Amino acid sequence: GPGGGGRGPLQLHHRPSPASARPPGGPALRSATYPPAAVDGAGCGGQGRVPEENELRGKVVWVTGASSGIGEELAYQLSKIGALLAISARREDELERVKKKCLQISSLDEKDILVLRLDLTDRSSHEAATNSVLKHFGKIDVLVNNGGRSQRSLFVDTNLDVYSAIIELNYLGTISLTKHVLNHMIQRKKGKIVTVSSVMGIMGAPLASGYCASKHALQGFFNSLRTELTDYPEISIINICPGPVQSKIIQNVFTENLAKSIENSGDQSHKMPTDRCVRLTLVSTANDLKEAWISDHPYLAVCYLWQYAPTWAWWLMNRMGKRRIQNFKSGIDADASYSRKKK
């Protein structure tokens, strides 16, 4: 489909051309997919969808940020598919816990999952880490750049060293690791680089100015990198843009200063379940979509407004942003008021 991968007409919410787009709010504009059949498998053969289990089984997939949240769930679903895993994060004990569960729920053997401690901010270690994965598996088919941290603080209250730390982790750490893995993929002339960006890489929102900046940087970088790889058509650059997802990411966000943690993360139950987000991520990866928006409303509608009617998007985000700040100051989840799900 337009803006997507080159494998038939499958359309998740990647960024389509205006001629192919349906109007925001239409009946097909639903959580992360149109047509809905492209997600759950019913009738997908007619849509040209490549099943993720067929595309990823037996492939070596390196997932960063794999100790919790989306990265942890990626490890579980990939292990069930039969992918060979390298899982990385700073907390090695948590990675061992994830590996243990992967072995319990899949047919993988001990040697099929490599636990590799990795600090994205320690860029001098990235070459050695890449070599460790290559030594263990002999290749890297898919790199999933998932490591990073979000933010909950107003710019006027936040120390600038917080912004430096966000960029160092979310942006520079990600492209540093990508550089080493990409050299290997260029030698093989194939591979997939999947980056978990955010809908915040498409729009702006209060309480996350540094996080938005880092995700916009990732969007710009990987969209540019894709244009530099036209001589390597089998190397795919895939940007995944989730909206709010049920995750522990809120418990580990950057705040006004580097020493402070968030006091109350609020109720997360109104957000998209992590397993659904990951399922759609793997569908997008298997089908080489260049960009996928994986979100519930109202963020999905805002993405479309931002694309086709930015003046309306600014108006809506100003209204939503005011409520978001009020929620945060009241000690509830910043996005709680936008839920369309019944409690």
Image: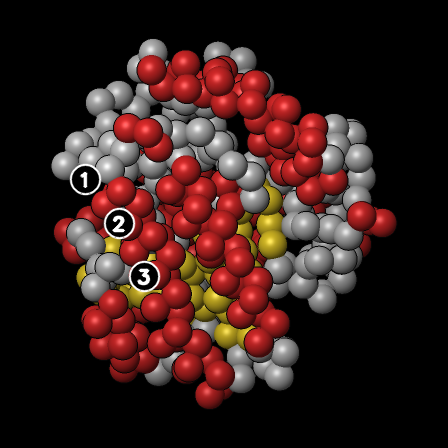
Element carrying mark 3: helix
Q: Label 3 neighbourhood size at 10 Å, few (<14), some (14-19), many (20+)?
A: many
Please report whichever mark, 1 or 3, sits nearer to the chain's N-terminal start: 3
Q: Please name the residue that numbered disc 2 is placed on.
A: 165
What's the amino acid at mark 1? Leu
223 left or right of 269? right
Of circles 2 and 3, which is in front?
Answer: 2
Name the residue: 58% across, 77% down: 229
Q: What residue is disc 1 on?
A: 258
The image shows residue 281 at horizontal and vertical percentages of: 53, 51
Q: Residue furthest bottom?
A: 187
Please rate how many residues cluster around mark 2, counting C-alpha atoms within 10 Å: few if below 14, some from 14 to 19, many from 20: some
Element type at mark 1: loop
Q: Earlier in the sequence, mark 1 or mark 2?
A: 2
Q: CA distance from mark 1 to mark 2?
A: 8 Å
Which residue is at a point 51% across and 36% down the rendered structure image? 204
Asked if labels 3 and 2 touch by Cβ distance under 8 angstroms, the answer is no
> Mark 3 is on which residue type?
Gly
What type is the residue that disc 2 sits on?
A: Ala
Drawn side of residue 289 relative to residue 334, left or right: right
Does 286 appear above or below 243? Answer: below
Callout 1 touching callout 2 (CB < 8 Å):
yes
Report if residue 286 is visible in the image.
Answer: no
Q: Which residue is mark 3?
A: 173
Label 2, label 3: how far apart the Cα atoms are: 10 Å
Q: Residues within 10 Å of mark 1 (few under 14, many from 20)?
A: some
Q: Nearer the viewer, residue 71 or 25?
A: 25
